[in-house]
Amino acid sequence: MTSAPSHASFFVAHRRGPRLAPAKEAVRAEVLRLRAEGHSIVEITDAQAATATPLNRTGVWEICRDEGFDRLPTRAPSERRPPMRDRQARVRAIAWPEHPAGEETSYAGLLLLVPALVELDLAGAVAAARLPGTREVPALASVLSLLALKAIGQRRVSHVDDVAADAGLALFAGLESLAKATALGAYSYRLSRAHGQRLLAALGASACRAGQVQVREFDLDFRAIMHFGEDVALETHYVPRRSQRTESVLTFFAQDGETHDLVHANATATKASQSGEAPAFAVTGATSPGPTPSCWCSTPRSPPVQGWPPSTPRASLPHPVVGPARR
């Protein structure tokens, strides 16, 4: 006769886990001291964030609740204590100190670009382009602010608030503090296509004089920038990432074949003008200062060149050699 199976294992009293949070217990005394002095949950959280045992607002409130503290009533702005963070400096041209001074920054490597920008005479190019500026924020400072965001990898101007108080970025732009997203966005909208054309022309001449562009061969390419909105009056172009034709902005780029520096860009190319972008750039390259280019490299996706502009004699242009661009 077999005995009935035992089910005693289903009724075993399991050992409970720890009921105390070590992080809370480590800061409990300090949290209660600050709460007794009248500090709010937010102020206590900010104070603990700078210590070796930070605690979020939920943990701080649970400690106060367990000890019988109620939430503080909403106080008038005049009764609130100042924030426990440094106030951002005013956005204006920096007043250079008479003696060397030190500041902490997370982007000190950006200052290594300054010698190259001086050699490129960026200040002269900005002046030649007649970019808008104010007495507090000159045009060069606005351009350097936008350039700094691109150099550190900020994909959008709206993300400038995360780094606006960094001393290294402000020093790079020649300001006490970087402008916020609204100011930089408004400045971008003030610029017209004529401003960009004059700036590129001045930078191209400076790059030739500084040797940053060798002007012996160029790589030409088209890129379609896809549009994600609705109801737009855009042409359809082939987008390689989607492997399909869709509404997009066709852009034309030219870079130096040796230094790989960008020397020309046009975001107004259309299907009708696409085949004339390369000849038009060739005319500009033939009349620009420096040696005459001897080689023009294009990608297999580039449209066939149907002819040179009729207003320019064919003999005055360099002989193009069309081939696959080097990657």
Image: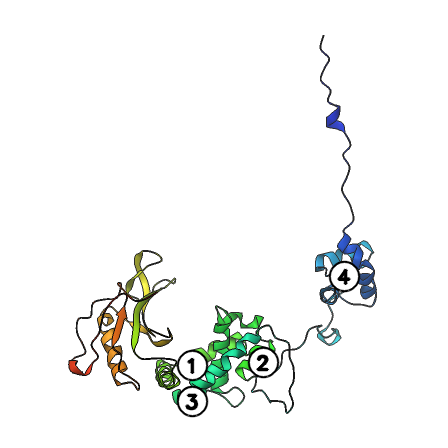
At horizontal 50% and vertical 82% (from top left) the residue drawn is 114
Residue under pointer 3: 124
Q: Earlier in the sequence, mark 4 or mark 2?
A: 4
Q: Earlier in the sequence, mark 2 or mark 1?
A: 2
User: Would residue 311 be seen by someone viewing this image from the given angle?
Assistant: no
Image-based side of 9 in relation to 313, left or right: right
Q: Amino acid at mark 3?
A: Gly
Upstream in sequence: badge 1 or badge 3: 3
Q: Position of residue 151 (x, y in %)?
A: 49, 73
Q: Pointer 4: what residue?
A: 71
Q: As displayed, is residue 316 above or below residue 233?
A: below
Residue 278, numbered circle: none
- Type of amino acid at the residue the image marks with label 4: Arg
Report if the CB atoms under discs 3 and 2 are less than 8 Å apart.
Answer: no
> Percent from the top left, x then y, of residue 241?
36, 58
Residue in view at x 74 percent, y 70 percent: 75
- The amino acid type of the residue labelled 2 equals Ser
Q: Position of residue 317 (x, y in %)?
A: 20, 81
Q: Residues within 10 Å of mark 2 (few under 14, many from 20)?
A: many
Q: For residue 259, what is the image quadrant?
A: bottom left
Q: Would you say the residues marked 2 and 1 are in contact, meaning their CB atoms lie under 8 Å apart?
A: no
**Circle 3: element type:** helix
Disc number lying in front (1 or 3): 3
Tell me the mark number nearer the camera, choosing from 3 and 2. 3
Which one is in front, 139 or 173? Answer: 173
State which tag comes first along the sequence, 3 or 4.
4
